[in-house]
Image: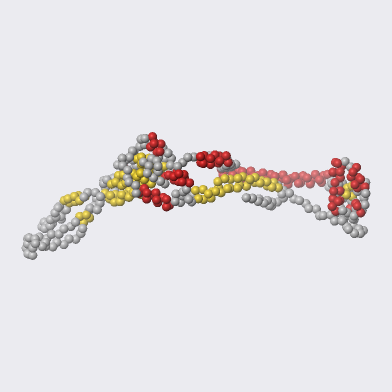
Amino acid sequence: MEILFSFLPNQAGGIFNTTQLIEILGPVSAENTSDPSASTLTPIHTIYIPLTGESKPVTKKPLLKYNPGITPLICNEVGPNAETTQAQLQPYQPRAAVLNAPNVEHTHSLLTEPQLFAKKDTLVAFPNDRSVSVRPGGKHFKSLFTQANRYSYVDPDYAFTDEEATQIKDHRDNYIKYIQNTRIARMNKKDTIQHFALADSVNIGLKPANGLKPPKPDIAELHEDLKAAATAKVSQNTSEAMSKLLSAKSLEEIEQKANKRKLTDGLNAIPMTNQEKLDCSKALSAQELRNVVIGPPSVDFGQICLRSVNTKDMVIANNLNQFVHIAVNIDCRELRQTSPLTQVVPPNSKAKLPLVFESNTKGRFQRNISYTINYSHMNHILVYADVVPVALEISQTDLVLRPEPGGIGAGSLDGTAVFRETVTLYNRRNYTAEFTWSPIIGEQGTAFSIRPATGVSS
């Protein structure tokens, strides 16, 4: 790919220096997203290109034009452009003044090389340009035939004296010094502002990352990495897992496969064998962590009573071909009875870790419980609970007593009649509740009795 840089100066003179940064963008895995295949374009390398430019004004002189016909009285043969060098004679081919000079080539042959080189830049004095031969000094004119220097002099009416030339030079030098001093003061002011902006205990007046360049990628290292990857001996399942990202469908299949496994009991709390120690000390990749399913992500105990013991299982499914070590970190009193806190899960197996909850404080409980896989990969689950006191529910609050059919004194209006109804108490909580009936006894006593007067509802 070709990149074209154009330089368009705004003023003449001066040297333009700058450094152009070219950033090479490449796809990088996106952060803070649930899609493992998402990527963003991020600069992966920066190239520094120094650019230098200078604007020089170019004076374009008008082309020489010779009179092709009869020369007028008030004009010479070469017209208004009389400054013609010896090297410019051939392209323009003037009239007889040059063509009929047979001694020109002979004169050239008699000159040495330095003289011939100097002669090319010498102006030509034509035979009929006397009217314009009065000109300021400093320019050398030679005739075509004899190579004699044409006379020139300095006209005192149009020339500066030595004192005037000195004054002009001093005046010009004053302006040049003023421009230079103004530029120095402006640059010092800019540097001072930048220094105070960065004058702290961290930057100490230095611009952060000033002058730092990113390292250039080494092709040799890239070839070594490719060679090592090509010669590595891995199993077919591992190579397939490392060569492609897990899709949502594959993750769902992993969870379904983990749910169908049977629970394994009697697991070790710490690695015992050499194989277990070796597998549990390995750091897992992102693909391998996807194959270790620990859930549910949130454990909700629901409404539970004060001082009641409740248990929920945290299920661990290991779909890898190696042992994994799971350690749960309990940092609250409510879950202090949880045991065991560590387990070594065999390959392709499923285990559970019971979470035991007991609270003496009424209210809403919410806590993050962290766990570690193979001593290096940390994650967490969320535990919810709503701690409430013990409570019973009664089937009805208003009770109408009616005579019991077949009872003693049934149908009579004396005091021997018996009226009986039944109420039901419901214990919808998870803890045993004791109850006691306390009738309100007035001055004349009471005609009601409740049986049983006390009891326990499980």
| 205 is higher (above) or lower (below) than 62 | above
The picture quadrant where one finds residue 415 is: bottom left
Q: Is residue 116 visible?
A: yes
Q: Quadrant of residue 119?
A: top right
Q: How many marks?
A: 0
Q: Residue at x 57, y 45 (%)?
A: 45
x and y, in percent, of residue 295 in the image: 36, 47
Query: Residue visible at 35% across and 40% down?
Result: 343
Q: Is residue 145 left or right of residue 331?
A: right
Residue at 65%, 51% (x, y): give it. Answer: 4
Q: Is residue 33 visible?
A: no
* Direction from residue 235 to residue 10 in the image, left or right: right
- The residue nearer to you, when weighing 187 against 135, is 135
Give the camera-side residue of 11 and 39: 39
Residue sitting at 70 percent across and 47 percent down? Answer: 54
Query: Residue 327's x, y, as percent?
Result: 36, 40
The answer to whether 283 appears left or right of 340 in the picture is right
Specify the color scheme.
secondary structure
Report the front residue among 155 and 73.
73
Q: Position of residue 315 (x, y in %)?
A: 34, 46
Q: Against 312, is 423 above or below?
A: below
How far across and down, in percent of the image, does residue 17 sit? 66, 46
